[in-house]
Amino acid sequence: MPEPFAFDSTSPRFELPFLFVGQAQKEAWVNEAHARIDVLLHCSVEGELTEPPLTPADGESWIVATPATGLWAGKDGMIAARQADNWLFVSPREGMRIFDKSTRQERLFTSAWQTPNVPVEPTGGSVVDSEARAVLAELISALRVSGVFPEI
């Protein structure tokens, strides 16, 4: 007897739910997929918190900081999005970029959320060359962390 076809129930990257032929209550699955797409499309977050804000608005998204507490406990590093008065959690994927509104910076996910540090400006002195080299090295390092330059 031939083996039946096996289909995945979610997409591999962001676990968007798939529909099945004859599935009941399809609107729940489609709405779940649309909510996740809404979070991820041109993704931006309000900032990073360890627990939910007191008065979140629908459509807000946050990076769940470590150590997460309250309703966000166990969701460290995930994106928490407020949708229909509930929290929807999305696991970031390697190489994902988001815009952090609180810092006005783009953030990159490489095993954890990365934020480049601002290099220290040289202050001058009798020999500026060594300070300038140090600042350029910090700048290159910050650009590597942000994903502009590749890691060596």
Image (cartoon, rainbow, N blue to C red):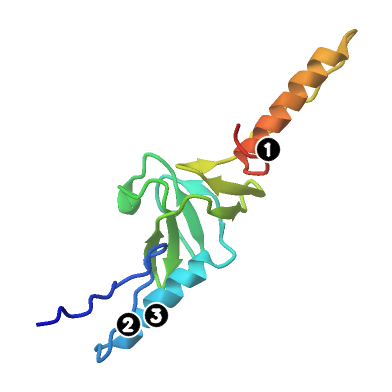
Dot 1 falls on a residue whose secondary structure is helix
Q: Amino acid at mark 1?
A: Leu
Dot 2 falls on a residue whose secondary structure is loop
Between residue 10 and residue 150, name the one nearer to us.
150
What residue is shown with label 3? 31
What residue is shown with label 2? 19
The quarter of the displayed image where residue 141 is located: top right
- Residue 152 in picture, x, y percent from top left: 60, 31
Q: Residue 136, relative to residue 102: is it above or below?
A: above
Q: Residue 106, relative to residue 57: is it above or below?
A: above
Q: Amino acid at mark 2?
A: Leu
**Gap in angstroms between the C-alphas marked 1 and 2:** 42 Å
Q: Residue furthest bottom?
A: 22
Q: Residue 143, which numbered label? A: 1
Near mark 3 (Cα within 10 A), the count class, few <14, some 14-19 or many ≥20, is: few
What residue is drawn where x is 64% and y is 37%? 144
What residue is drawn where x is 35% and y is 86%? 27
Label 2 vs 3, first from the N-terminus: 2
Q: Amino acid at mark 3?
A: Asn
Q: Is residue 58 left or right of 118 when viewed as pictured?
A: left
**Gap in angstroms between the C-alphas marked 2 and 3:** 11 Å
